[in-house]
Image: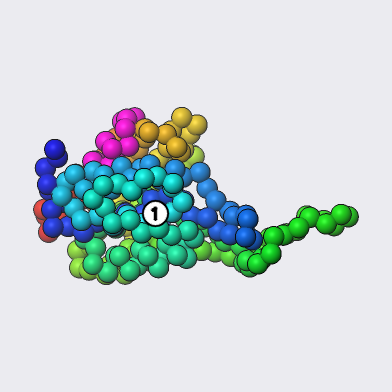
Amino acid sequence: VAEPDLAGRHVVISAGGTREPLDPVRYLGNRSSGKQGYALARTAVARGARVTLIEANTGLPDPAGADVVRIGTAVQLREAVLKAAADADVVVMAAAVADFRPAEYATGKIKKKDGEEAPVVPLVRNPDILAEVAAERARPGQLVVGFAAETDDVLANGRAKLRRKGCDLLVVNEVGERKTFGSEENEAVVLSADGTETSVPYGPKEALADTVWDLVSGRFQQM
Ligand code: C5P
């Protein structure tokens, strides 16, 4: 059993990937499995936290001891995160949020018609939830943690993203075939707004989760 170093803390974690509906049968989605967010939830429960897990389309069983809120789209995720963040000590945005959604939802299934061109689907930007939560800080001393999956210039892009989003910690993954999506393992560097960088070697998603909580718990102790 881990040290209950998060006892008395309310942690809010988003997990999974949003789906942005086009019509009643289709959506724009992404490959996030939700496993990293669930590992964060399990380890936070083990360390004594009160956990709110905001789940987007994972199909995973509820982690014992966490309050689970189910949502589907980025707009719904934003609403659920802002609500839960109001009394959170730390918000961890592990969910993969669609950057864009279809500008309009077709209430009937979009049909292909003989002799017609393929339809063009206009998209609009989704809100950046992480940036909003980081800018708002619903509570003094609230910590905000983001995730970033990068394919190249991983560290340089990660450092720029940490500043742009205004979060305290950013967990940067290199996206690859073997790593990250759907896998039980992960490998990452945790970048901190104070400039420290913590490498987490390839291993179970729980190990990366525990490193995040070690860093969070260290911050709480300094406050
Ligand atoms: O900008 P990018 O999508 O790479 O940033 C990833 C981080 O930002 C993740 O923590 C993700 O949950 C969060 N995010 C968000 N709202 C968006 C897009 C990403 O909160 N619209």
Q: Quadrant of the C terminus?
A: bottom left
Residue span colored magenta:
201-213
Residue indicated by mark 1: 55
Image-quadrant location for residue 67: bottom left
Residue 29 rendering spot, x and y as whole percentages: 55, 51
- Is residue 5 magenta-colored? no
Q: Secondary structure at mark 1?
A: strand
Amino acid under disc 1: Glu
Query: In the image, 20: left or right of 193?
Result: right
**Would you say the magenta stretch is mainly helix, strand or loop?**
helix
Which sits in the foreground, 114 or 125? 114
Residue drawn at x 23%, y 50% is 65
Choose top left, top right, bottom left or bottom right for residue 214.
Answer: top left
**Residue shown at the point (32%, 63%) measured from the top left:** 134
Residue 176 vs residue 40, the one in the foreground = 40
Question: Does residue 41 appear in this view?
Answer: yes
Instruction: Tell me the residue at 46%/29% (across/down).
Output: 178
